[in-house]
Amino acid sequence: MDFGRLITAMVTPFDEQNRIHWGETARLIDYLIEEQKSDSLVVCGTTGESPTLTDEEKLELFRFTVEHVAGRCKVIAGTGSNNTAHTIELSKEAEKLGVDGLLLVAPYYNKPSQEGLYQHFSAIANSVSLPAVLYNIPGRTGISISAETTLRLAQIPNIVATKECAPLDQVAEIASGAPAGFIVYSGDDAAALPALAVGAYGVVSVASHIVGSPMKEMITGFLAGQVEEAAKLHQRLLPVFKGLFECPNPVAVKYALNLRGYLVGSVRLPLIPPTEAEAERIRELLN
């Protein structure tokens, strides 16, 4: 399964009552594929506010997205949690709905050992036939999947990639030691180009909601050997990459999308809308 170079971790649009806004979800999907050049969409990841979505909402989002995408890009379902049995059940249900792959976050809060991490991910992978992408984000989970554990998991046939929010040396270690067909995605927009330089395949992005098309140009240019041009694009995009994370994600990107005319609504508690000072900085970024 090739999920492409540019994967967007899609926000979940809400209406004024903080229910899923299906009409705006359809508009957003079209926009991300057609205008921002996304190769795949992650549905119900962190950027999609997975912690505050019910299982019923997640499954309906998976179904709706698969049907509306209609083969125009790949759909990756965020089914990971810190409960192995629950993740297995949600992953099986997602598979029935026709998603193309799974995103499996490292178990948060209960902080398993590296062997526990291996057994968690292997149990999930062995319960489905879908390709799975590991998601290592120590800043949110309190635990890091080591390079050694990732490379061990890479031997499982349907664990096909990892989304790394780890230092570049870990990205390089995984990329250099992985079996054929296993790939590394940067999980940090600001590190996307440096990660490509040390062996990453692409990026799972938040900023691609706003600057996906130039990000795709940056990636394509780098791969074509136009390193200086890619670096200039990276430098131009860097304020957006960094500015969208001045608030807890996805607060800033949802505010930015609303400014762009995509009425994705606000965020669910415990997240809160941007302060006026934060909102002003986001408006300046878009200008």
Image (spheres, rainbow, N blue to C red):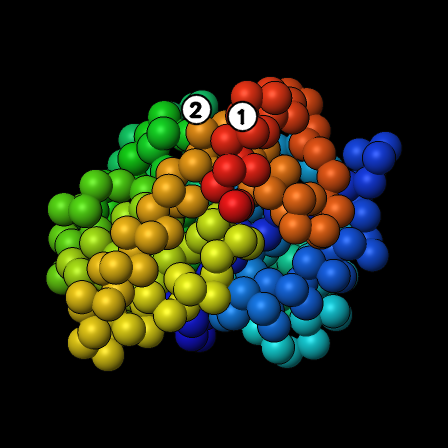
The tag on residue 225 is none
Q: In this figure, which residue is indicated by the disc labeled 2?
A: 110
Q: Is residue 14 left or right of residue 236?
A: right
Q: In this figure, which residue is indicated by the disc labeled 1?
A: 278
Three-letter amino acid code at the position of disc 1: Glu
Three-letter amino acid code at the position of disc 2: Asn
**Marks 1 and 2, how far apart at CA:** 33 Å
Specify whether residue 250 is in view. Answer: no
Question: Which mark's residue is nearer the viewer, 1 or 2?
Answer: 1
**Dot placed on the residue nearer the N-terminal end, 1 or 2:** 2
Q: Position of residue 9 (x, y in %)?
A: 53, 52
- Circle 1: element type: helix
Q: Position of residue 247 (x, y in %)?
A: 50, 28
Residue at (33, 66) in percent of width and height: 218
Q: Position of residue 137 (x, y in %)?
A: 37, 38
Outermost residue toward the right? 17
Labels in figure, total: 2
Residue at (83, 56) in percent of width and height: 23
Q: Is residue 131 left or right of residue 231?
A: right
Residue at (61, 21) in percent of width and height: 276
In the depicted view, which residue is nearer to us: 82 or 194?
194
Q: Is residue 8 above or below residue 139?
A: below
Q: Is residue 154 above or below residue 225?
A: above
- Circle 2: element type: loop
Where residue 267 sits, quadrant-wise, is: top right
